[in-house]
Amino acid sequence: MKLYQNNRFQLNEFNIISLFFLLLPIGLVTGPFIPDLIVSLGSLYFIFIFYKKKLFKIITSKIVICMILFNLYLVIRSLYSENIMLSLESALFYFRFSFFVLLIIYVILLNENIIKYFKFSLLITIIVILFDGYYQFFTGYNLLGYGAHNYSTNTLRFSGMFGDEMVLGKFLLHIVPLYIALSFYKKTSIKLVYTNTLLIIVTLILIFLSGERTSFFLFLILSLLFFIFTDLKKIILPSVFIIFLLLVLTTLMNPRVQERVFQTTFNELYNEKGEIHFITVAHQNHAITAFKMFLDNPLFGQGPKMFREKCSELKYNSGIHSCSTHPHNYYLQLLAELGLIGVIPIIFIFAMMIYFLLIYAKKMWFDANTNKSNYEIGLIIIILTSLFPLAPGMNFFNNWVSILLYLPLPFLLFPYFRLLYMH
């Protein structure tokens, strides 16, 4: 690009950053430490090149201004919480995720081939994780010797490379769609459509077998959106039929899947008194506790990471499952800990993704010359599904979770920044 002809990285600098970025997918498999180290070092390096390359124009971007304001709010709110040090654990360096996004945008603008290399890194990681997951399901042990876990007398769950952490489905929910979206970058073909469809089916069945119900239903919704709004719609009918058939056969042939996905869910939502719950009793208690915290300070909440501290207080108590490290829903957590001011940015992003998807749907149905690509629509669907407000979730401020949530952003935003610098 002309913008960077006189402002390029030296080759070794670019290679170092690229290498760190390309190692991120496999780093996510190892746990939170390595990927967070990559993000932290990347964010520090962005601060360095921000001054070295005089990228001051980037601050004028509305997107960056919003990022800065959100991160400042987290720190300020922490300083006024009842446990400042605990709140600052999540808030003080949360800016690293935003800076890492900006660093990757800059790297992509320097050389868009990094998208191709990152896509390859994702694919290798996905193949290893899928093979390892199926291997553990059929043999009882994965390639590293980790065994499946008995959570009840008839419920066997497995997590592949993730060991004791039941996040195999969560990982695949974020990583596989990202690869599919990136695979459509500047190209599409019927071969790519068939390959991505096969990948979706294989991933969906593995998540189903793993017993991670939230990840399964979100991946199912995401898959349907991909089949409706991208070129995968060319084979939507046979794909949906195959998925339905495989899910039925898997359920009939595996009693443990029936126990975990259907019987356990039924028992949690329909108790012996005949009462029907739309969410489990534990999640209901968490939700009520979080909402009480929100009502106690609706504008600013209780402070980052304070749900775990204050959930035992009598005025917030909502039952035997009132307490946890977080309320297991992103929106409820932000309402409880950051108030309306803190949750508005997430609501705005979710609403914008719906808006973009509806605009594209209108063009797709009434205008054959729509300019939106499978790549862009895929990324929009990923963000939309990740922020689905009714789904149970992990801790919003968890390092590992935050990386997964932020990862699609640089690929969606870099065209915007390219236009910003061209003007």
Image: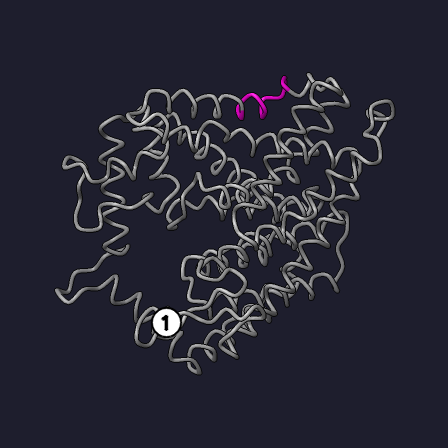
Q: Is residue 403 above or below residue 192?
A: above
**237 or 410, which is in the foreground?**
410
Image location (x, y in percent) of residue 228: 57, 56
Does 157 appear in magenta? no
Left or right: 128 as drawn, with respect to 150: right
Residue extending farthest to the bottom is 253
Q: Secondary structure at mark 1?
A: strand
* Left or right for 52, reference 147: right
**What's the residue at 52%, 68% (across, down)?**
206
Whether 190 is drawn above or below 28: the answer is below
Query: Measuring 40% from the left and 74% from the top, which residue is drawn there?
Result: 257
Is 66 inside the magenta-drawn segment? yes
Magenta residue span: 59-67
Mark 1 surroundings: few (<14), some (14-19) or many (≥20) residues within 10 A: few
Residue at 47% of width from left, 32% of height from top? 348
Identify the residue position indicated by label 1 in the image.
150
Residue 280 position within the rendered picture, expressed as x and y whole percent measured from the top left? 27, 56
- Closer to the camera, 287 or 52? 52
Where is residue 418 drawn, in percent x and y? Answer: 73, 29
Which quadrant would residue 36 be assigned to in this image? top right
Q: For the stretch drawn in magenta, what is the main secondary structure?
A: helix
Q: Amino acid at mark 1?
A: Asn
Query: In what quadrant of the picture does the N terminus appear?
Result: top right
Name the quarter where the C terminus is drawn: top right
Figure check: 244 above or below 359: below
Q: Quadrant of residue 415?
A: top right
Tally of numbered tags: 1
